[in-house]
Amino acid sequence: MIPPFQFNTTPRIVFETGAARDLAGHANVLGKRVLVISDAGLIAAGLLDAPLAGLNAAGVETRVFAEVVADPPRAVVMAAAKAGRDFAATGVLGFGGGSSLDVAKLAALLCVSDEELDDAWGVGNAKGPRLPLALVPTTAGTGSEVTPISIVTIEDDEKRGVVSPVLLPDIAVLDAELTLGLPAHVTAATGVDAMVHAIEAFASRSPNNNPVSRALAEEALRLLGANIEAAVADGANLDARAAMLLGSLLAGQAFANSPVAAVHALAYPVGGRFHVPHGLSNALVLPHVLRFNAPEAAKEYAQIAPLVFPQLGRCEGVQDCAARFAEELGALNARLGLPAGLRSVGIGEDDLAGLARDAMKQTRLLVNNPRELREADALAIYRAAY
C-alpha cells in the first residue's frame, strides 16, 4: 500500500528560452511596484538589463536591491525587507543564484508579515502573509525556485533554515539563456549540488518520501548525468544548459517534499565557517557520505546509479553498485575540475572536529539520513574527505 504523503510545489512554472525578457507578461501577479533582489555581479554582467527594460516598458516601477552575497547573513535579509517596505513594493522578484532567491523569499515574507525572523526558523513556523513572489534562477543547481526553503547564515557562521509552504513563489521563470557563459567551476559545483538534491531525496528517510519525489529525482538524475560534463566543457551549449536547468528544477521539487540529509548537514558548516560555495561543499563530502550510508541505502543507490552512470547497470549486486556509485561520483568531481579535498579549500586538519560539532546542529536534516549519524561518524567522514 502506498503510504499517505503531501506534495507542494510552485503553482506556475514557465520554462522557455528568452522568457526573462517578458517578465511583465509572465509575472503580472507582482503588480506595478516590484522590488528586484539580485547581486552586484549579475548587474555588472548586464543580465538584468533586458528584464528590467521589459518591466519598465510595461509600466512597472522597479527598485533593485543588489546587496546579496553568497551565504547571505541575517543583515542582508533584513536590509532587503526594509528596502521593500520603504519602496511600498507590491511584489518581489528574485533574480540570480540560490542566495538571491532565498533572500527574495524572506523579504517577501518580512515586508508584510508581523512575524520576526527568529520566530520563523525551522519547519512550518513561517505563517505569512507575504507579497506576491516570482523567482528567476540564473544557475542550474539550487532548485530554490520550487522549494519552500530559505537558508540564512547567522551568528558563529551557523546556517539556519526557514521551511514553510508560504515561501513557495507564485511563479518560477526558467530561461536557459541566463545560464549561458556561466563559469565552468560554477556550472560544475551547482550541477553537482542539483545531483545531491536528487540523490538525497530519493534515499531520504523522511516519512514524506513519496512516489512523486522519487520519480522526479530519477528524471533529474538522467538529465544531470547526461549533460553536466557537456555544460561544463562548453558554456555556450544551450541544449546542455537547458537540460541542466530542468534537471535542477526537478531535483528541487523532489527534495522540497522528500528532504535532504547528511550530505547537506556536513556541507553547511564547510560553507558557513570557510565560505566555500554550497555546491562545492556538497561535492567535497558527497562520495564519503554515500559510503557511510551504503549499509542502509545500498538498494536505493543501486537503483539510481545507472541513471547517472549507465555502465553501473552491470554491477554485481546492490552493495557493489553502491560502492561504485560513490567512486564514480568522486571521479566525476575530478573530471569537472572540482577541488579534490577539504584541504584544498583552506580547511586545516585541526578544523575537522569543530566542523563535526557544527554538523550535529543540523538536526532538521540528519533525521532524514538513511543511517544514523553521530558526531564521531561526522568526524570520520570529514577525515575521509580531507
Image (spheres, rainbow, N blue to C red):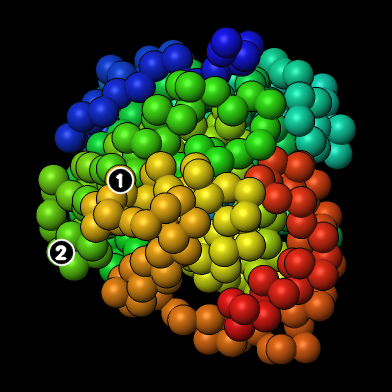
Asked whether 341 or 109 is in front, the reply is: 341
Tell me residue 102's x, y (percent): 58, 41
User: Which disc is residue 307 wearing?
Assistant: 1
Crowding around mark 2 (Cα neighbors within 10 Å: few <14, some 14 to 19, many 20+) is some
Q: To which residue does mark 2 refer?
A: 234
Disc 2 residue type (three-letter): Asp
Q: Residue at x 30, y 23 (%)?
A: 14
Q: Residue at x 54, y 23 (%)?
A: 210
Question: Image quadrant for the C terminus?
Answer: bottom right
Tell me residue 93's x, y (percent): 46, 32
Q: Height in image: 206 above or below 42?
A: above
Q: Secondary structure at mark 1?
A: helix
Q: Is residue 25 visible?
A: yes
Rendered image quadrant of residue 185: bottom left
Asked whether 367 or 15 is in front, the reply is: 367
Question: Image quadrant for the N terminus?
Answer: top right
Disc 1 residue type (three-letter): Leu
Tell me residue 216's x, y (percent): 40, 30
Disc 1 versus disc 2: nearer the observer: 1
Q: Residue at x 47, y 63 (%)?
A: 323
User: Which disc is residue 266 wearing?
Assistant: none
Q: Secondary structure at mark 2?
A: loop
Tell me residue 17's x, y (percent): 17, 35
Q: Residue at x 29, y 74 (%)?
A: 335
